[in-house]
Image (tube, helix red, strand yellow):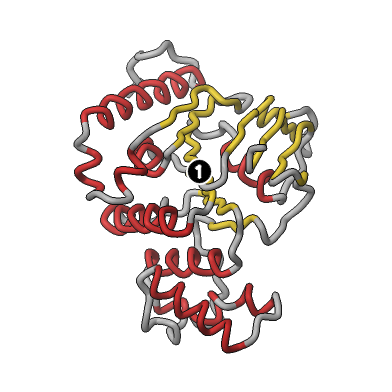
Amino acid sequence: MSHLVIDGLSMRFRPPGGGTVEALRDINLSLERGELLSVLGPSGCGKTTLLNIVAGFLAPSSGRVVLDGREVRGPGPERGMVFQQGALFEWMSVRDNVGFGPRMKGMGRKDRAQVVDHLLETVGLGGFGGKAVYELSGGMQQRVALARCLANDPEVILMDEPLGALDALTREKMQGLVLKLWRETGKTIVLITHSVEEALLLGARLVVMAPRPGRVHRDYRLPFAGMGASQDLRGVKRDPLFTERREEILSMIWDMEDEIMGRAPGEAVPG
């Protein structure tokens, strides 16, 4: 049995003004334990809607999500979420943010301190436990968010554009951290991104979604996440296969964007 199954998932919204918006149609995916999946597609293809359904924040119109044989019917500790903005508790210290989940579970202070110390070291924030969240850079706050997610020991980590707000250098460092955590923890990770390059780097498996309604267009198995877990990411980007796949997927996405805008594929943008 697969670890995470998305079975015939469709989602329709009813806006206040009337009518129906079909966000997703018949999504079918199966993930094995420990897979790292990146999901890519043009704006409006339903990537975040899909992630929110897997997280249990939204109920699908039809179909289901099954984790280890149990249907997802709402949020649960076995699924951890990392948002684009860290969604941290600003009034708490870094240490208290990371330890919040274990404290809610009733973990003792000594055990909790050991878990927090280990995770802060893991994400490169050893010595920052006493800092206030607002004292940290954006990249450091995302490290806290990752540590807080891991502190709950979820089976699946869901990441919604977690690196999208970071500058280029910080983003590359954080990409390396995501691969390090994936390799060391063996967690199943589903990551949403708008960046083709990031999707290739972080996706041992990469799904390209088509828009209106959102559906699976292509499903790739890729070597780059495995390579990046033990090699310099810039070296991975220079691999000829990486360049080939990047250009192939970029062309695919641009054709979809042209279709959305009512242009013929490859037609020049006015202005």
Q: Is residue 192 visible?
A: no
Residue 5 is drawn in which quadrant? top right
In this rendered view, identify the residue nearer to me: 18 or 217. 217
Q: Position of residue 199 (x, y in %)?
A: 40, 39
Residue position marked by numbered label 1 in the rendering = 35
Q: Residue at x 52, y 22 (%)?
A: 217
Q: Is residue 105 above or below residue 228?
A: below
- Image x and y of residue 44, in percent: 56, 33
Which residue is at 24% across, 41% downward? Answer: 236
Res. 13 in view: yes
Q: Would residue 153 be found to the left or right of residue 232 on screen?
A: right
- Residue 165: x %, y % from top left: 41, 55
Q: Is residue 168 above or below residue 102?
A: above
Q: Residues within 10 Å of mark 1 (few under 14, many from 20)?
A: many
* Image position, residue 58 (x, y; %): 73, 46
| 52 and 18: which is toward the camera | 52
* Residue plotted at (22% across, 50% down): 232
Closest to the observer, 135 or 171: 171
Horizontal side of 19 relative to 115 (left or right) equals right
Give the residue at x 60% y 55%: 155
Q: Amino acid at mark 1?
A: Glu
Q: Is residue 16 above or below residue 143?
A: above
* As drawn, 59 above or below 248: below
Work out whether residue 203 or residue 56 is closer to the camera in this orientation and state it. 203
- The quadrant of the rendering that contains the N terminus is top right
Q: Residue furthest front?
A: 1
